[in-house]
C-alpha cells in the first residue's frame, strides 16, 4: 500500500520541487509506484473553452498529446465533463453512468487506447474562485479502484497541485507557504484513517510544461 514512508517521501518531493519539471518527475514517480505509468495534471476550466493560462503537466505519450491538442479534443473530453460533476475520484469505467458518450467521444477513447491509455482514475480539483482542474492516473491494465487507492490518489493529486500553485505564484512574485514536515507526516496518517485533504489548484501557461 502506498502510505506512510512512501507517501511522506512523495509529499516531501513536492514540497522541495523548484521547477515544474521537478514536480512532474515527482508526480510521475509516485504514479508509477502506485501502478500507473501515465499521469496528467490539467486545468481545463469550464468547457468548451479552456482558460488562457492553464496548467498542463503530463508524461502522456507525445503522439497522443499532439493528436489531442491539434484536434482540440479537450472540448469534448468526457473525462473533463464528468470531473465537473463530481467532487471525488472516479474511474473511467464510471463515465457512461454520468454522460451519454457521443461517437466523437468514443473515438477519443479508442485513440487513447492505441497509446496505452485504456483505464484511468481521475481526481477532480475544485476550489472557489479558480477554474476547474483534474489529475488523471492512467494505464493499460484494468484497475481495482479500492477506497484506499482512491484516497491515496486524491492526496497525491491535491498536494501536487499545492506544489504547482507555489511554483506558479513564485514565478509571478507571490509567496505561497510550503507544506511543513509535520504536515506531510500528518497527511500520511490521514490516508491510513480514511481522511481526504482539501484540494488545491494551479494555472501555469498552457502546454509549456511536459516531460516524457
Image (cartoon, grey):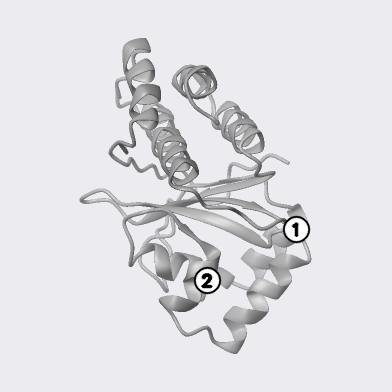
Residue 116: mark in rendering: 1
**Residue in the picture at 68% in, 62% down:** 118
Q: Give the number of the disc on residue 200.
A: none
Q: In this view, does 180 lie above or below 58?
A: above
Compute the Cα span from label 2 to label 1.
17 Å
Between 15 and 149, the one nearer to me in the picture: 149
Image quadrant of residue 109? bottom right
Numbered disc in front, either 2 or 1: 1
Graded by Cα atoms within 10 Å as few (under 14), some (14 to 19) or many (20 or more), the crowding at tag 2 reads: some
Residue 8, horizontal then vertical, whole percent: 47, 19
- Whichever of labels 2 and 1 marks the residue nearer the N terminus, that label is 2
- Residue 48: where, in percent of width, then height? 42, 74
- Kind of element beneath mark 2: loop
Task: Determine whether the residue tagged by mark 1 lies in a helix, strand or loop.
Answer: loop
Q: Where is residue 68 in the image (x, y as percent from the top left)?
A: 65, 66
Camera-nearest residue between 171 and 7: 7
Identify the residue at horizontal 67%, vertical 80% (top origin). 107
Amino acid at each position: 500500500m502506498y502510505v506512510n514512508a512512501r507517501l511522506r517521501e512523495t509529499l516531501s518531493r513536492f514540497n522541495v520541487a523548484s521547477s515544474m519539471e521537478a514536480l512532474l518527475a515527482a508526480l510521475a514517480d509516485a504514479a508509477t509506484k502506485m501502478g500507473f505509468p501515465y499521469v496528467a495534471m490539467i486545468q481545463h476550466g469550464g468547457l468548451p473553452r479552456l482558460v488562457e493560462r492553464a496548467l498542463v503537466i503530463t508524461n502522456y505519450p507525445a503522439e497522443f498529446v499532439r493528436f489531442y491538442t491539434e484536434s482540440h479534443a479537450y472540448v469534448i473530453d468526457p473525462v473533463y465533463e464528468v470531473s465537473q460533476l463530481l467532487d471525488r475520484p472516479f474511474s473511467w469505467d464510471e463515465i457512461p453512468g454520468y454522460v451519454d458518450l457521443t461517437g466523437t467521444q468514443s473515438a477519443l477513447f479508442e485513440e487513447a487506447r492505441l497509446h496505452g491509455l485504456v483505464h484511468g482514475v481521475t481526481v477532480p480539483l475544485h476550489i472557489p474562485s479558480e477554474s476547474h482542474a483534474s489529475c488523471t492516473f492512467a494505464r493499460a491494465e484494468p484497475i481495482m479502484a479500492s477506497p484506499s487507492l482512491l484516497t491515496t490518489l486524491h492526496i497525491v493529486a491535491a498536494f501536487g497541485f499545492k506544489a504547482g500553485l507555489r511554483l506558479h505564484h513564485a514565478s509571478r512574485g507571490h509567496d505561497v507557504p510550503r507544506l511543513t514536515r509535520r504536515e506531510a507526516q500528518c497527511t500520511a496518517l490521514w490516508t491510513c484513517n480514511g481522511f481526504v485533504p482539501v484540494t488545491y489548484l494551479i494555472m501555469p501557461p498552457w502546454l509549456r510544461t511536459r516531460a516524457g
